[in-house]
Image (spheres, rainbow, N blue to C red):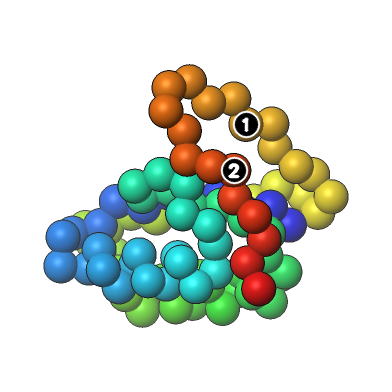
Amino acid sequence: MHVIVVYDTAAERNPRILRTCRQYLHHVQRSVFEGQLTPAQLRRFQATVETILDLTYDNVIIYTLAPGTTPFRHVIGTAEPAPTDII
């Protein structure tokens, strides 16, 4: 399934959440990642993220699209290259 992740965390947790997101997804923009994950990969990703966050302060939003669905990306301004598959 296609996954888009947006996060807003405290500065001291940014490096860990960034590393975790990069292990699973493509870095699209500062705190935005996207890519294809299996349901098992998504569960592992979510479990890892939950161990990093301070749930009283940090915020991570995970958008999932149905398998076989590819979102249309319309970019205005200077864009990062479109992501390619990891692994």
Q: Position of residue 69 (x, y in %)?
A: 79, 44
Q: Which residue is mark 2?
A: 82
Quadrant for the N terminus, please. bottom right
Horizontally, is 47 left or right of 55 in the view? right
Q: Position of residue 84 (x, y in %)?
A: 64, 55
Q: Residues within 10 Å of mark 2 (few under 14, many from 20)?
A: few
Amino acid type at image mark 2: Ala
* Residue at position x 56%, y 78% in the image: 44
| Disc ID at residue 38 | none
Horizontally, is 21 left or right of 30 in the view? right
Horizontally, is 31 left or right of 72 in the view? left
Horizontally, is 37 left or right of 47 in the view? right
Q: Position of residue 39 (x, y in %)?
A: 71, 70
Please tell me which residue lies in front, 57 or 15.
15
Q: Residues within 10 Å of mark 1 (few under 14, many from 20)?
A: few
Q: Residue furthest right?
A: 68
* Residue at position x 63%, y 67% in the image: 86
Is residue 77 shown above or below 55? Answer: above
Whether label 1 touches label 2, CB < 8 Å: yes
Amino acid type at image mark 1: Arg
Answer whether residue 45 is visible to the viewer in this image: yes
* Residue at position x 18%, y 59% in the image: 10
* Residue at position x 34%, y 67% in the image: 17
Q: Which residue is mark 1?
A: 73
